[in-house]
Image (tube, coloured by chain):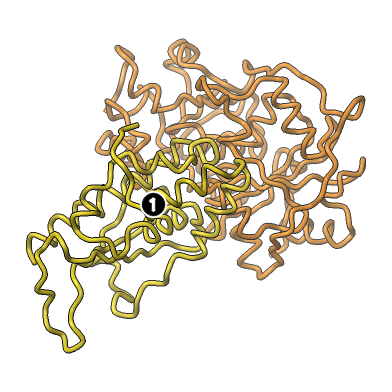
Amino acid sequence: MSDEPLPAGLAEIAEDFANLPVPQRLELLLEFSEGLPELPERYAGRLGEMEQVHECQSPLFLVVEVGDEGSGGEPDERPAGERPVHLFFSAPPEAPTTRGFAGILHEGLDGLTVEEVLAVPDDAPFRFSLGEAVSPLRLRGMVGMLSRIKRQTALKSQAA
Amino acid sequence: MASDFTQYAHPDRLVSTDWLAEQIAAGKVGTGADDSIALLESDEDVLLYDTGHIPGALKLDWHQDLNDPVMRDYVDAEQFAKVMSERGIGRDTTVVIYGDKNNWWAAYALWVMSLFGHEDVRLLDGGRAKWAAEGRELTKDVPAVAARTGDAAYPVVERDDAPIRAFKDDVLAHLGGPLVDVRSPGEFSGELLHMPDYPQEGAMRGGHIPGAKSVPWARAANEDGTFKSREELEAIYQGEQGLDPKEATVAYCRIGERSSHTWFVLTHLLGFDAVRNYDGSWTEWGNSVRVPVEK
């Protein structure tokens, strides 16, 4: 495990998991699964424009948006690195583990700046004490999500 | 259509959703009593059980409960006995298993229980998806089953791998004999190094074991996840592929779960005498040095 720190939100989630006995870690993961926000209306029926995370054993699609438009639709004028990152996920209810991973990343990363998201260590998925509860093999889905979130954030903040 | 399991070689290995619902209504499922039926859910997704399951069911996770945590192998006799006793299961208990993904993991769990010689273990035809599609009850209540202890505990029985499990060396010795590759056509031909959507289970080389016949597992299943009729299955495995129920046959896939499904079909539905599941499958063969590969 690297020494690079997690952003505060993810660090708090990691601590919550670490403080629970193994069976209750699954319960918390299920809460994240149930708490994953619905895909907003504007992405309905547009999965093709989102990115599929093939490392997940169930279909998961995600898309990253960088920057906030003003209330009148004016563009975000802040320097690219300071713009906020927003995450959107779609995963079916019969894939609660995948949804749970997405829920953790949403809770911990949504609203952070581009710089903060790009600084998230790549081994973050292994810091939630979930290896024992769900098996390390299953955690690779979260690794795949994080790497795509960072890649989309990098691309979209350059283009902005 | 009513399920007629008498057509199959071992009709007592399948139960229907109707039958299971009747047993639940009669209070026979998941009580832990001596004459009760133990119902286990075995899924690919480790949390699916927790979102709601068939009343009376307990979770059996292929990763956490059936695999050795360190070595690539199944649990040993002591651990298996512990997993069974914790779920109130004795050596004579009737066990019904169901799961997601067309019962892949349920068939895999049934096969692992068969390695330990558990006699009465059955699959719910159609699995979790059929039960849910029929609008039947799912609950989050976990049944309170008392663990078996003392004389009632599940006995420590050594696993007997030889009859139904093949290792790489067994497969090498079997080359030239009938082999069934149950992976997707792209994996069989070697175009794909992994199953679509499962890249973490990739291999260094693509292709198949020389002489293997390609029969993707799904050909044995209907749209609703139930098994096809015996006549239809015979037409595929015996007619079209020329497999002989009297000949020793080996089935494999990528990690051994889809081939457990086919192992179940050949052994229990068609009555093949000697089918072994090669659980090392392509994640072992396709990564091994100097084993023959056909493309």
Pinpoint residue A80: horizontal percent, then vertical percent: 11, 63
Rendered-image quadrant of the C terminus of chain B:
top left
Which chain is represented by orange in the image?
B
- Is B97 positioned to the left or the right of A3 in the image? right
Residue hosting label 1: A10
Residue pictured at 26% horizontal, 63% vertical: A63
**Callout 1 environment at 10 Å: few (<14), some (14 to 19), or many (20+)?**
many
The quadrant holding residue B291 is top left
Rendered-image quadrant of the N terminus of chain B:
bottom right
- The residue under label 1 is which amino acid type? Leu
- In the rendered image, is residue A114 in sight? yes
- Single out the residue that lies furthest toward the bottom: A72
Position of residue B22 relative to residue B206, above or below, is: below
The quadrant holding residue B75 is top right
- Is B157 positioned to the left or the right of A35 in the image? right
Residue toward you, B146 or A56: B146
Which element carries disc 1, helix, strand or loop?
helix
Residue toward you, B269 or B106: B106
Pinpoint residue A4: horizontal percent, then vertical percent: 28, 38
